[in-house]
């Protein structure tokens, strides 16, 4: 049974990898004369992206709210987090809406992830779109585990304020070292013993 699960998982992973590889480099807008995907148009589309190149290699934080946000949050860990050792997290808040009147952000760590240094309050009036507002915070994981640094970002425009919550994962040490066995595996083992 376990071999079947492993084989099924491997086949599924191979299928996803094949689909992903097939999708790479394709374009839905072929050149009208040759029928070949127009790479120049793709490069021009990338170049027109208003986001500053200094954050291109940063990871995107996950928005935990369902509403579309007027801002993006990107992050980068300076070092591999280790329990009991502070680690710096570079953050870049990127306004996307040119009509924004004000942006502010507050950061906090969850239980087991101490926020050591968050700097002054982040608050910017009339932020230009696509220009990152950078901040470095220092966090201290207390033990091995997977933690979340939370960012609550409030964006205001036209008298309307919306707060978006972002999650930044911090994996300290070995992460989750022991995973509990699945109940189904225990039940099948007990069935074998009773025979």
Image (spheres, rainbow, N blue to C red):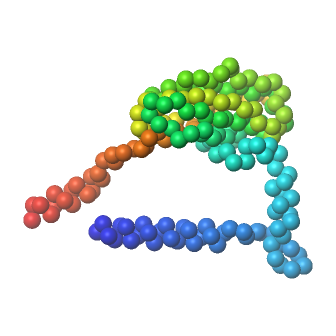
- Tell me the residue at 30%/53% (across/down): 182
| Residue that lies at the very extreme toward the left in this rendered image | 195
Q: Is residue 64 visible?
A: no
Q: Is residue 34 left or right of residue 146?
A: right
> How far from the left and from the top, in percent, is residue 189?
19, 59
Q: Is residue 93 above or below residue 57?
A: above
- Residue 22: image quadrant is bottom right
Q: Is residue 82 visible?
A: yes
- Residue 89: image quadrant is top right
- Tell me the residue at 40%/70% (across/down): 8
> How far from the left and from the top, in percent, is residue 41?
86, 64
| Residue that lies at the very extreme toward the top in this rendered image | 120
| Residue that lies at the very extreme toward the bottom in this rendered image | 34
Q: Quadrant of the C terminus?
A: bottom left
Q: Is residue 66 above or below residue 114?
A: below
| Residue that lies at the very extreme toward the right in this rendered image | 33
Q: Quadrant of the N terminus?
A: bottom left
Q: Is residue 179 left or right of residue 32?
A: left
- Residue 16: image quadrant is bottom right
Q: Is residue 141 left or right of residue 136?
A: left
Q: Is residue 79 left or right of residue 132?
A: left
- Tell me the residue at 85%/52% (across/down): 48
> How far from the left and from the top, in percent, is residue 59?
64, 46
> How far from the left and from the top, in percent, is residue 58?
67, 45
- Tell me the residue at 62%/70% (across/down): 21
Q: Camera-side residue: 134 or 97? A: 134
């Amino acid at each position: 049974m376990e071999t079947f699960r492993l084989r099924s998982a491997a086949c599924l992973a191979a299928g996803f990898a094949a689909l992903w590889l097939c999708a790479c480099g394709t374009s839905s807008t072929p050149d009208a004369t040759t029928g070949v995907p127009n790479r120049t148009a793709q490069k021009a589309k990338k170049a027109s992206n208003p986001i500053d190149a200094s954050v291109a290699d940063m990871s995107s934080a996950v928005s935990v709210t369902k509403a579309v946000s007027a801002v993006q949050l990107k992050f980068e860990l300076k070092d591999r987090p280790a329990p009991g050792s502070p680690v710096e997290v570079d953050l870049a808040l990127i306004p996307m809406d040119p009509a924004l009147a004000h942006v502010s952000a507050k950061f906090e760590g969850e239980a087991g992830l101490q926020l050591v240094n968050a700097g002054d309050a982040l608050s910017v009036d009339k932020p230009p779109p696509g220009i990152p507002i950078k901040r470095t915070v220092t966090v201290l994981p207390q033990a091995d585990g997977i933690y979340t640094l939370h960012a609550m970002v409030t964006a205001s425009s036209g008298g309307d304020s919306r707060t978006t919550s972002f999650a930044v994962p911090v994996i300290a040490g070995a992460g989750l070292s022991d995973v509990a066995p699945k109940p189904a595996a225990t039940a099948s083992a007990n069935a074998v013993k009773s025979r």
